[in-house]
Amino acid sequence: MHATSADTAPPEADQAPTFLVVGAGGLGCPVLMALVAGGARKLVVADPDTVETSNLQRQVLFQHADRGRPKARVAAQRIGHADPRVNVRAEVAHVDLAFLRAWRSHTAGNTVVLECTDSPALKFALNDACVDMGLSLVIGGVLGWSGQVMAITPGSACFRCVFEAPPPPELSPTCASFGVIGAAAGTIGFLMALFALRIHRHRRVAGRLQTIDLRSGRCANLAPRPRSSCPACGRRSHGAREPKPSSPGPVPRAKVPPP
């Protein structure tokens, strides 16, 4: 995917969306940096956790001196110092349906949510909530050398159209057990930010799922259609047909999506 001059131009001030970054970890840190580099001016970062030194190799906004401090507040502070033009706010909180409803009722203008956590259950929960509320969403995941990004907007295929349900906890791969290459997290985080910026500029990215294996350099781009039997968006897709792949071969239905 190549960025054009229209992709890289900063959003107009009066049309600038709010980017809600859920998770300030290995994905959330590069997402925040890339959004600012891409001209974002309204950011909210939400994370209930504190900085741990064991994660510093991929959570690049933090330092050893930040240990024990709320990640959301430290990340917001660093972004604000890097570019004073950015309006950035920290929320030391879990993001769930109640949070999003309250957020929606107090926020004017467009919002793009970026799911940057390592929780498969939260990815599905935010997918369902954003589909129900008509919010645009970018979901990312990274494990080892590999990662994936999916962009979702009202009317497009959603996360459940491809991955039907979260795996049981005992079958869910974790960063702690499999590890994450810091550069892989950075790459996926920057791609998530690019998808979010392209959603705002109405570029053709909604409903697309991109997977990357950074060890081999292989990439795959899928464009599934909304699935009529999808428990999240199917009820909103009247007459929708079953998804068809954008290239020969079946649309993969991974049983265990990367966290």
Image (tube, rainbow, N blue to C red):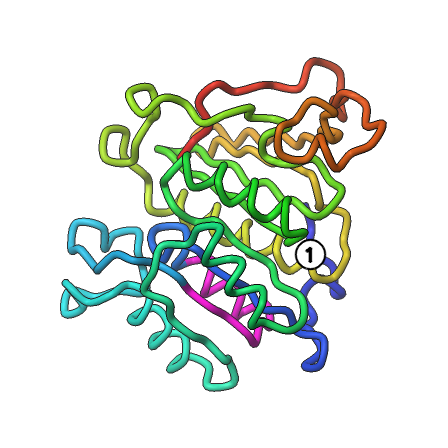
Q: Is residue 205 magenta?
A: no
The answer to whether 4 is drawn above or below residue 73 in the figure is above
Q: Residue at x 41, y 80 (%)?
A: 80
Q: Is residue 10 visible?
A: no
Residue in the foreground of this view, choosing between 201 and 234: 234
Residue in the foreground of this view, choosing between 129 and 18: 129
Q: Where is residue 121, by image quadrant?
A: top left
Q: Residue at x 57, y 19 (%)?
A: 253
The answer to whether 151 is drawn above or below residue 91 in the figure is above
Q: Position of residue 20 (x, y in %)?
A: 51, 62
- Of the residues shown, which amino acid type is indicated by label 1? Arg
Q: Position of residue 133 (x, y in %)?
A: 63, 51
Going by the image, does 88 lie left or right of 151?
left
Q: What is the residue that sits farthest to the right in this orientation?
A: 239
Secondary-structure class at tag 1: helix
Which segment did they paint magenta? 30-45
Q: Is residue 14 visible?
A: yes
Going by the image, does 146 lie left or right of 112?
left
Q: What is the residue that sits farthest to the bottom in this orientation?
A: 84
Residue hosting label 1: 198
Q: Is residue 31 magenta?
A: yes
Q: Quadrant of the C terminus?
A: top left
Q: Position of residue 73 (x, y in %)?
A: 31, 71
The answer to whether 219 is drawn above or below residue 65 in the figure is above
How many numbered callouts? Answer: 1
Circle 1 crowding by C-alpha within 10 Å: few under 14, some 14–19, many from 20:
some
The answer to whether 115 is drawn above or below residue 84 in the figure is above
Q: Residue at x 69, y 22 (%)?
A: 229
